[in-house]
Amino acid sequence: MPAYWLLKSEPDAYSYDDLERDGATVWDGVANNAALMYIRRVQPGDQALIYHTGDERRAVGLAEIVSAAYPDPKLGDPRLVVMDLRPMRRLPRPVALAEVKADPFFADFALVRQGRLSVVPVTAEQWARLLGMAG
């Protein structure tokens, strides 16, 4: 059974459009220890919501994680890990952070509780609800 994640990206730096264009990417640039801990737990076949930060603040697409975590080959520090992912599909309708925060169901969601983390787990129930909100 796959695990579910939410991955944040500043769309000016790397957007879902970029992921679709590239067909796959190394998800790197994460330095926060808690977010790195989550990356270390990913497995191939896990799925992720790609969330645009900044002015957008909304989940826009789905991706599949295609590798386990591995040390970032560009940095030479085994503590700084990355993962590979590929796009799956755009959400029919983006889900805004304001919508998530307005729904009491998400009170314990890491996106709401730990807003600064760039990688957070999503429970199966939260995943189903988010996809339902997206249409």
Image (cartoon, grey):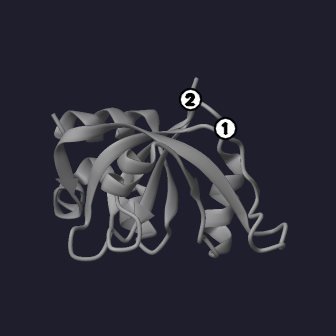
User: 10 Å neighbourhood of mark 1: few (<14), some, or many (≥20)?
Assistant: some
| Residue found 23% across the figure and 55% down from its top | 100
Q: Quadrant of the C terminus?
A: top left
Horizontal side of residue 5 vs 69, given as left or right = left
Q: Is residue 107 visible?
A: no
| Amino acid at dot 1 | Gln
| Picture residue at 19% right of the left edge, 49% below the top | 94
Provide the secondary structure element on which disc 2 rests. Answer: loop
The image quadrant that residue 44 belongs to is top right
In this rendering, would 101 be left or right of 78? left
Q: Position of residue 129 (x, y in %)?
A: 28, 37
User: Quick check: marks 2 and 1 in contact, CB under 8 Å?
Assistant: yes
Distance from disc 2 to disc 1, alpha carbons, whole Å, reads: 8 Å
Q: Locate residue 75, reporting x and y percent.
A: 76, 74
Q: Nearer the viewer, residue 100 or 56?
A: 56
Q: Is residue 39 above or below residue 31?
A: above
Where is residue 73? Give x, y as percent: 77, 64
Q: What residue do we see at 71% from left, 43% from top?
A: 68
- The residue lying furthest to the front in this view is 21
Mark number displayed over residue 43: 1
Q: Is residue 89 visible?
A: yes
What amino acid type is highlighted by mark number 2? Pro
Image x and y of residue 95, in percent: 20, 51
Label 2 sits on residue:
2
Specify the quadrant of the image occupied by residue 33.
bottom right
In terms of image quadrants, where is residue 102?
bottom left
* Above-or-below relation of 1 to 58: above
Q: Earlier in the sequence, mark 2 or mark 1?
A: 2
The local secondary structure at tag 1 comes to loop
Q: Residue furthest top?
A: 1
- Seen from the viewer's position, the closer of residues 107 and 55 is 55
Which residue is at the front of the view, 116 or 73? Answer: 73
